Amino acid sequence: MLDIETFDNARGGNVVYKALAHPLAAEKLAVLAARLRAAGPVAIYDPDGIAPALLALAPGFDVAGIYVHDTLAVGQVRAGYSCAALSDVAASKAAIVLVAMFDAASVIARIARFTPPGAVMLSLDEVKLPADMLSNGKQYLDKLNFATNFVFFRDDDHLATRLVTANYWAGYGAKQVRLWARLFGGQGDIIQDFEIDAGQSVASIVIDSRDIRRRFNLAPFTGQLFIHAIGVAGHDVVKYALDTYAVDGSGSLSCTHDANAWPAERFAGLPAPRPGEQVILWLQNSHALPMQAGTVTLDRMGAEAPVAIEGEIAAFATRAIDVAEYFPHLSWPAQLELRAGRHVVRPRYEVRQAGRSRIAHINVERADLRPDPGIKSLAPSLGRGFLLPFPILPRAAFRSVALPTPMAHSQMDMPLRLDIFAPDGRPMTQHYLGVLPRDHDCAVDMDEVLSDAALPEGGHGELVYDFRAGGAADGWLHGLFRYEARDGSHAAETSFGGHIFNTIMTWKGEPQSYNGPPPGLTTRLYLDLGDPACESFCALIYPASADWLAYSQTVLLLHDRLGSVVAEHQIAIACSGSAMVYPHALFSAEALAQAVGGYVIIRDATCRLFGYHGKRDRQGGFSFDHMFGF
């Protein structure tokens, strides 16, 4: 496993990691590492604990020792070395003293007289990005300087990809935003660097693989796109939705959402194939170092018998892994976990069936959580506590299936119940699932818990904790939700996690707020508008852990491609209810004509809604994934 710190829920993302792993910084880091290897012993002065990540991402040079000025840190082990006192560095006989920090000129001047005679002093300033790529030129390790993400990007004779988002940074005061992008091919080769001017307004951003291929006259590719947003304010994450659509007439259509730019130790929620299906895991190396054979493994969830992925995966390369080649006898609803060792950002998987493909993503499995007895005795003001809401699509046309997924290393069981609600908020039924073991294969088909006549227009379900037969909980409740057209033509799937929703009282950061402190009781969701040939839609759910407002006060704001509001439409969703939203049916033809290339913002200042978005084409194809907001 790479000895790097990437992200944790308490502190957020590690800016130092991004500063070292950025593809342009990684090129300079490789040059620096080669110089260090050639020079001889290197003493590392490590005032901020950067040495482990540095040695993980730039291995191979001779380390004379790691030195610290904090007397309490002397003797700590970092990257396998016992930290020594900086006052003793002169005795190291190092040829180079590397100051493991950025903006290090004053520190170098301060400690120079303590270094070995003749030693050259260097710092991580050697690997800085160019000044014109920084949002804040005064503070290099400002998180806004590293607003980056990876995109599964593909264009061939069968499928193409389209990234859609908006310049939401302009809404936080950014004056001029641009995107720097590097397209990597399947072997990790650099295909093309390019930039996109995102402008000064909250305008649409679209990166379509078809356009990129035509613009640069490229051959077919399946790889990854690295995006760095420059000139940003307010958010250090590049959030986007990614459509995968057919160019071969197959009718394939899918979408995935991503706001997670961090490599993780494990990912979970990878479904095993059903008969007639092929499940392909797309492994994409997120670093400038090769992934050695055997360092990444797959395991049947809960089996604790991981199987190593064969062969090396080159720097920034992409490999398709056929799950059945490693687990030939495993089938849905069994699920797998990927032990990725912090080598990859959240991967995609592809399900191929009857000539069509659908793409979805797996989720980060947390290492820091342990069962919390306090969840069993939450205050009555928190009502039903943690809820994981998911849509039940109109039942005449769709089949809806829920698969609970363990999403933390320590989750050995999940005590769960399924609560189902009508669109008007009426509780329809409850279905106790039991205390599911980590290796369970319990997928709940809504047809099995609802009568044929119930909820013809759909509704929603909520997975909740139920301790009647024991079990433990940590608050990191997740599930995979599969939707299939009744005629067997198309399918889609999505996954997400639970929260406490719409209570004025809080518990350990819940109800969660993405803007300001909890309780998070407002909504701001993004929905790409699509076009008449492939219209967007979304399922909005008003989950409530306890009693809240009887109806939401939800406004749909239609924006044109430059970010100006063209029209608005108000809807009221009942507490514990839901609504299917079809923008092309709600807004006038005149407004939609003005908004071509634009988007819809779902805004509510009275409650926290949860949403799932997708597209539907004229051939009956559809896509589905959870929404994001900014």
Image (cartoon, rainbow, N blue to C red):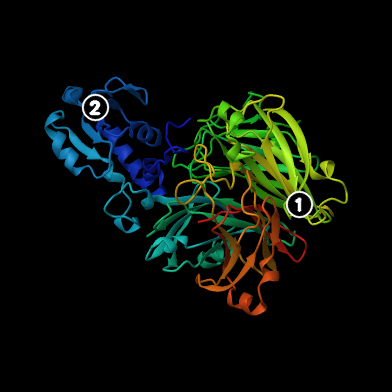
Residues packed near mark 1 inside 10 Å, few (<14), some (14 to 19) or many (20 plus): many
Going by the image, does 501 lie left or right of 87? right
Q: Which residue is mark 1?
A: 422
Q: How many marks?
A: 2
Amino acid bearing label 2? Asp
| Mark 1, secondary structure of its residue | loop
| Mark 2, secondary structure of its residue | loop
Going by the image, does 75 lie left or right of 219? left
Amino acid bearing label 1? Ala
Going by the image, does 474 lie left or right of 227? right
Residues packed near mark 2 inside 10 Å, few (<14), some (14 to 19) or many (20 plus): few
Q: Which residue is mark 2?
A: 70
Relative to 167, say whether 290 is above or below. Answer: above
How far from the left and from the top, in percent, is residue 618?
A: 75, 66
How far from the left and from the top, in percent, is residue 261?
A: 49, 46
1 or 2: tag closer to the N-terminus: 2
- CA separation, marks 1 and 2? 61 Å
**Quarter where residue 366 is shown:** top right
Residue found at x 44% / y 63%: 171
